[in-house]
Amino acid sequence: MAQDRDTQPHWYVAHTYSGYENKVRQDLETIVENRRLQDLIQEVRVPTETVVDADGKEKESKLFPGYVLVKMIMTDETWYVVRNIRGCTGFVGPGSKPVPLTDAEVYRMGVEARSVKLNYSVGDSVRIIDGPLEDFVGVVEEIDADKDYVRVVVSMFGRETPVELELAQAE
């Protein structure tokens, strides 16, 4: 079981019966409200995306069928509440010990948006600070903050080469 020591909320993944994701989310939100556990179980999500089917109609599709994401402070009480929701089969992790998602996993899965403070703009010279082109210098050609990328033109082997990077990879 979980320890009562951690005071920071983390994202955990709860496994559900297929098709029960929304029911588990609703039931968990109801219990959190009834028991006033909002400070311990802060958010429950079923990640979805909008897809266009063959007929051209848009519909919501679950990104991770059979899973619900829960942002919570792990205590014995919160573990018990989530674990005993009808349709929930347990947490992802070895045995009965839930493993929180890392910040990188949370960001990659699109659960929470990460804010990157830009100290450059289009036309500025930047230095690449991460990746295979680390320490190269180039000129910013395009910035797309929503998609978290910047296109930098770098001079390699006497040729101008556009390179796409994450926003945090250049300064």
Image: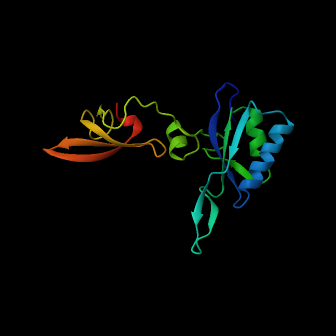
Q: Residue furthest bottom?
A: 55
Q: Is residue 72 above or below residue 157?
A: above
The reply, left or right, for residue 165 in relation to residue 103 is left
On the image, the x and y values in percent for residue 102 come to 53, 38
Query: Going by the image, does 158 lie left or right of 91?
Result: left
* Quadrant housing residue 100: top right
In the image as oriented, which residue stretches furthest toward the left?
158
Residue at 83% x, 38% y: name it: 33
Quadrant of the rendered structure where residue 150 is?
Answer: top left
Residue farthest right in this picture: 34
Q: Residue at x 27, y 37 (%)?
A: 139
Q: In this picture, is 129 found above or below 5?
A: below
In the foreground, 103 or 93: 103
**Residue 152 placement, left or right of 69:** left
Tell me where residue 71 appears, x and y as whole percent.
Answer: 66, 38
At 23% across and 47% down in the image, what residue appears?
Answer: 161
In front: 72, or 60?
60
To which quarter of the image does residue 118 belong?
top left
16 to the left or right of 120: right
Looking at the figure, which quarter contains the N terminus? Answer: top right
Of residues 104 and 13, the one drawn nearer to the viewer in this rendering: 104
Q: Position of residue 12 (x, y in %)?
A: 63, 41
Which quadrant of the rendered structure holds the C terminus? top left
